[in-house]
Image: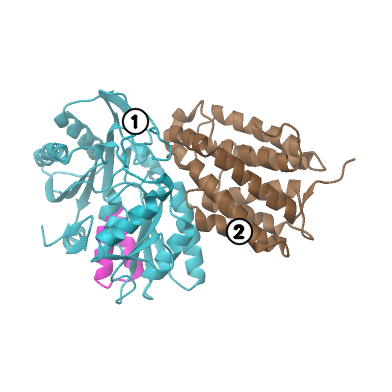
Amino acid sequence: MTTAVTLDYILLGRFLATAAERLEEMRAELSALDGEVGDGDHGASMADGFRAASLGFAKAGGEDVPAALRAAGESFLQSVGATVGPLYATAFVEAAKRVEDGRIGLADLLSAFNDGIVRRGNAAPGDCTMIDVWDPAARAARDAGAGSIGAALDAGRAGLEATRTMIASRGRAARLGSRTLGQLDPGASSAVVILSALAEVLGEPEARG
Amino acid sequence: MQRLFNNPDDIVDETVAGFVRAHRDLVRLSDANPRVVLSHACGTGDRVGIVTGGGSGHEPAFVGYVGETLVDAVAVGELFSSPTAKAFLEAIRAADTGKGVAVLYGNYAGDNMNVKMASRMAAKEGIEVRTVVANDDVCSAPMADRGRRRGVAGEILMWKVGAAKAATGAALDEVQATAQRAIDATRSVGIGLAPCTLPANAKPNFEIAPGTMEIGIGHHGEPGTAVTDLKPANDVADEMLKIILDDHDLASGDEACVLLSGLGATPICELYVLYDRIERELGERGIGVHRAFVGNYFTSLEMMGATLTVMKLDDELKELIDMPAASSGLTVRSAG
């Protein structure tokens, strides 16, 4: 029996800062991936968005964690349009609702991200979107009981790999139809970068890469 | 990469700054949001406000259609990326005179979400908002699935008609219905001869092999329906026209407004070569061209190729297309 993994203001702040850093490193690669199937703006949108979210979260301070998460979403929305602006902004707003006593459980955080993004974008698993990472990751974290980031990351990576065999039906990549076959979905790829950053912060070995 | 920029991250800010300087007789920058461009008449008079927005890299779209009896406020996005919901919200606020705002934009996932969020936020502030989503790009989805079709250069004709209707003092519902009728009467098709490159990415998003062309290509290089050998201009014109006429209910005796736009790197003279054939072929079918616009109206960075847009006119659409209007991208002086 392990204790449930929860994140407080400090850990959430580290998570956002690390995700911003890793997305910045992946900026060109994610945009190139998006160029194959969409319009090529994904790397810039994600790197800029998480940097803004991280700064907004830090600026809000730790007194009121839900308010800080809402500020992160607000900053994301202020900084980034694209599709990911509304999607991740809603993810942060959803996460804010699930904070209790200044902490949020790992499984709750991942479920909130998944639920917020689904609510805004109306995508379902199998549509070849970031939901193909967030949905299995959230499920794995819940099933692991105490909330294991390792299990969530593994499930997310498997979901990312599965997007190669899917035909996009949402987002701008949807216009490509069958030509998305064999390609990793850019939104799913950046979702795994975010999950890896979370694993890195929670001290999961081999989280990088 | 043979391109002119400083830092790729600054391209949009510098584009907007240069645009507002160059066209200060027509536009100004919003004080509240540096990614919102306003016409001088924005927010004045007793009329419905007209708002649009979209990614940068399509100039003169979208900022180039801010002007007199045209768009009141435009939300500006990063290159090929939807503007923020906040920018759309500020554009809506600025354009409202109390009579409501029509947001007329193109069918892309990001724009749909950001406009929806902005509309909801505006409604909470008591501003009435209606939207019309352009879906004129024939090759992006079958007719039966028209809701999934992209919006391309047909948006310009939708803005022209919507803004002219608003200028008559029509109510928000009427402006929305008329803009909807305008886009419903419009079809577009694109052909690509060479790809485009986002400066930050340093290499093209996709390939078009030399000697070939891609039929049905989208405004960001979204793949079309076929890749064929590059043919002489007349054959290309015929191919584009066939795609539109097969999808449209244009018949002998009808009148049309035609917009032929370059995608950025195609010489303007080649657009006229295409246009000559297009108007003659329409004439052969008994379809008259009431008014034509030929030039770089809606580009995709330095993509090579063209888009053809045909709007079927009725008496009201004709009158609204003919209403004088002025912007840097489109000027109409008198009846055609």
Instruction: Identify the residue shown where x is 63% and y is 54%.
Output: A92
**Residue at the limit of the structure toward the front, as seen here:** B6
Q: In this rendering, does residue A37 appear at all? A: yes
Q: What residue type is labelled 2?
A: Gly
On the rendered image, what quadrant is the C terminus of chain A found in?
top right
Give coordinates of residue B75: x percent, y percent: 39, 58
Give me the disc on residue A56. 2
Subunit of label 2: A
Q: What residue type is labelled 1?
A: Thr
Marks 2/1: CA distance? 44 Å
Which dot, 2 or 1, sits closer to the camera? 2
Determine the main secondary structure of the stretch shown in magenta.
helix
Query: Does the magenta-highlighted stretch encompass residue B163?
Result: yes
Is B291 on the left-hand or right-hand side of B7? left
Is A82 on the left-hand or right-hand side of A123? left
Within the image, what quadrant is residue B97 found in? bottom left
Instruction: Identify the residue shown where x is 74% and y is 57%.
Output: A99
Circle 1 residue: B225
Is A1 on the left-hand or right-hand side of B167? right
The tint of chain A in the picture is brown
Specify the segment rendered in magenta: B158-183
Q: In this rendering, does residue A70 appear at all? A: no
Instruction: Identify the residue shown where x is 12% and y is 48%.
Output: B289
Instruction: Identify the residue shown where x is 19% and y is 25%.
Output: B231
Give the class, few, some or many, for how many residues have Cα within 10 Å of label 2's Cα (few <14, many ≥20).
many
**Which chain comes out cyan in the rendered image?**
B
